[in-house]
Image: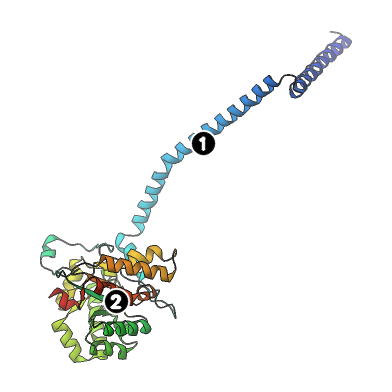
Amino acid sequence: MPAGFASICCMDIIMKKQADKINLIQKYKQLTAGKDKKQLILMWSTVLVCTLTIIFVCSCIIYTVNLNKTPNTLHTRFDEANQKMTNQKFNSYINSLINKKPAGNQQGTKTAEPEKGNVKETDKTTQKDNASVNKTIYKGVSTTQAAITFDDGYNRKYVEKVLDILKENNIKSTFFIIGKVLDDYPEVWKRAVNEGHQICNHTQSHQILTNMSDEAVQAEISGWETSARRVLGDDYLTRMKKEFPYLRLPGGGGAKSSRILKIAQKNGYKVIGWNVETVSSVINPLKNKKSVSEISDKIEQHVVNNCSGGSIILLHFNQYDMGNIEAIVKGLKNRGFQMKTISQLIK
Ligand SMILES: [Zn+2]
């Protein structure tokens, strides 16, 4: 083909393409100028529907993929966590956190035992073992009496406040005080005993007993007795072991463990639990959501409304339980309950 003819053909093609482009642009301009609005609306509607359809389909695919994936991921993580940390260690860890002594002036934020049953028992227990050991006592049988008990003993100011209120209302109570805390202000505990209250074993250093060897558990129980003997005297300890030999397990840990209960029994103790408490029922769920006074109001309602005949109520010397303590005592009295020591309640 001659070179001149080829270049003419190429030019012709280029010219035609240019003409097509111009036609398209003109056609679009005609459309956008409103000459054919129906076609314009139809075109954009089609684009919109297609876009929405694509987005919807993509969302469905992503959702379906995640739906299939998430549970497996969670299960895998849960299994991994289980492998790394047994239930016992986990519960003990949680309990060690909530039972940690507050630093400095933050007394009162101390929280302790979860309600019975919250501490999972992991010691191997057989029915035969259970048959030979005294079980934890959670309540008495009286329909008109209840026991208000106080644990740990941190915060001297609150302890003295409670002693004043109990005295004014002529109520005797049972205190489960940590051995080390007995040494912190002995005169206060002597006053409690002189005013007719019972001070009982809550172990020497408030560790979760299910984590410990038999020997270490024994040392915790005996250590408390040494502190009690030093602070309250030989006679008190002898009377206590004879008339009201009660032990409350730190964090409730071991309340259903035949191993722990056997060691307690061997030491002459009855293990005392509770059936009304405030830490896991009120304080922990509301701690970061409500003010201290609002939580104290809830505690007052909770304790007064949930107390029943034979109830063993567990309180701590913290700012929440102590906020309305006088109203709690009066509310229980107004409901007709006689407030007693544990030995009077369970005799
Ligand atoms: Zn405690």
Residue at the far right in the pictured view:
4
Horizontal arrangement in the rendering, residue 218 relative to residue 93 (left or right): left
Query: Mark 2 falls on what kind of element?
Result: strand
In-front residue for pair 48/213: 48
The residue indicated by pointer 1 is 59
Disc ID at residue 306: none
Name the residue type under label 1.
Answer: Ser
Along the line of sight, the residue nearer the viewer: 272 or 183: 272
Q: Where residue 237 sits in the image (x, y, percent)? A: 19, 87
Image: 173 above or below 52 = below
Identify the coloring. Answer: rainbow
The mark lying in front, picked from 1 and 2, is 2
Residue 280 is left or right of residue 245, and the answer is: right
Q: Is residue 107 visible?
A: yes
161 vs 33, left or right, is: left
User: Which part of the image, by quadrant, shows the N terminus?
Assistant: top right
Residue ranking furthest to the front: 334
CB-based contact (under 8 Å), mark 1 and mark 2: no
Residue 30, x across and y down, in percent? 77, 20
Task: Please tell me whether mark 1 sits on a helix, a strand or a loop.
Answer: helix
Q: Is mark 2 within 8 Å of ligand 1?
A: yes
Q: How far, Cα to Cα, is label 1 from label 2?
A: 55 Å
Residue 180 in the image: state x and y as whole percent.
32, 83
Name the residue located 61 percent from the left edge and 29 percent from the top edge.
48
Q: Which residue is mark 2?
A: 151
At x 13%, y 64%, the residue is 130
- The quadrant the C terminus occupies is bottom left
